[in-house]
Image (cartoon, helix red, strand yellow):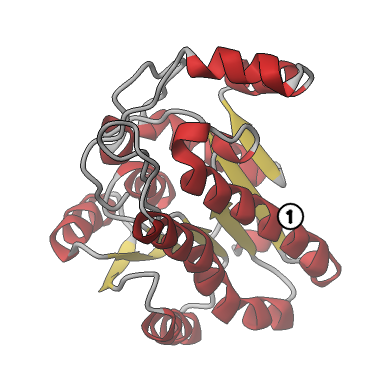
Amino acid sequence: MSARSGFPRSVVVTGGGRGIGAALARVYAEPGATLLLIGRDAARLEAVAAECRAKGAAVEIASVDVSDAAALSSVLLAFDAAHPVDLLIANAGVSGGLEEGRRMETFESAQRQLRVNLEGAIATATPLIEPMRARRGGRIVLMSSLAALQPVGDTAAYSASKAGVLAWGEALGDFLAPDQVGVSVVCPGFVTSDMSARYLGPKPFEMSADDAAALIRRRIERGAERIAFPWQMVAAIRVGRMLPRSLLRMILARVPVVIAADRHG
């Protein structure tokens, strides 16, 4: 059975060594599945791969940074040639925020977030677009954020990078629809992970990575094009978008964001 009849046999996950990426790898690990986990930390990837193999999946790992588009493309195309990809999950990402003393984040920090979060997602999806079109099937999943729906002043570059993923992903979905290739853009709220642990502030309705991964899989199986959760935060954002910007700014200012030392998610 193939992904086109409900079960993805060949799955790629970037950022597969931790957080939502690792949880998604585990949720798709079952007998008959072949997974490729991509990330920067080979030891973490191997640990997740061992968990997935214990569940009956065949697993390969590749230690590649998604900002290295040439290396990433080579790995993806080689895997696709051996195991035509049914489900591609572009999950790798980094975060950032204000500098000490509430100084604006540096250009270098902003550039890195755009390079990894936005360009990395595009670099992940692009090599497999034409193979999927030729097969007339498969699904591309791009990891955005609720910050794409409600930008946060203290994390401007992160919000911009995730808004870019949302825009590119929804446009890509329109482009690929005639070819029966699906695109889903995931906009999660707070999910327990190394990345969210760096966020030193309130995290309303925070979910575990495993719960988030299970929800994402269910929505993917329904063919959802935008997967935004938790519903409470989505509802709050919808209300907030109807408020005057000045009032919304006052509300958001009551919850300043502090981001600890940077690391990949």
As drawn, is 9 to the left or to the right of 197? right
Instruction: State the image quarter where residue 17 is shown.
Output: bottom left
Asked if one can make out residue 40 in the rendered structure from this viewpoint, the answer is yes
As drawn, is 154 to the left or to the right of 160? left
Instruction: State the image quarter where residue 68 is shown.
Output: bottom left
Measured as percent of width and height from the top left, residue 244 is found at: 76, 18
Q: Residue furthest left?
A: 43
Between 121 and 135, the residue placed more toward the observer is: 121
Measured as percent of width and height from the top left, residue 98 is found at: 36, 38
Between 251 and 17, the residue placed more toward the observer is: 251
User: Against 261, is 174 above or below?
Assistant: below
- Crowding at mark 1 (Cα within 10 Å: few <14, some 14-19, many 20+): some
User: Against 141, is 175 above or below?
Assistant: below
Asked if one can make out residue 10 in the rendered structure from this viewpoint, the answer is no
As drawn, is 60 to the left or to the right of 28? left
Between 64 and 148, the residue placed more toward the observer is: 148
Residue at 39 percent of width and 69 percent of height: 66
Query: Dot 1 lies on which element?
Result: helix
Residue at 39 percent of width and 72 percent of height: 67
Q: Amino acid at mark 1?
A: Glu
Where the N terminus falls, by quadrant? bottom right
Give the residue number, with chain letter if any, for mark 1: 170
User: Against 158, is 198 above or below?
Assistant: above
Residue at 52 percent of width and 33 percent of height: 153
Tag count: 1
Measured as percent of width and height from the top left, residue 228 is found at: 62, 34
Measured as percent of width and height from the top left, residue 255 is found at: 44, 16
Residue at 45 percent of width and 38 percent of height: 155
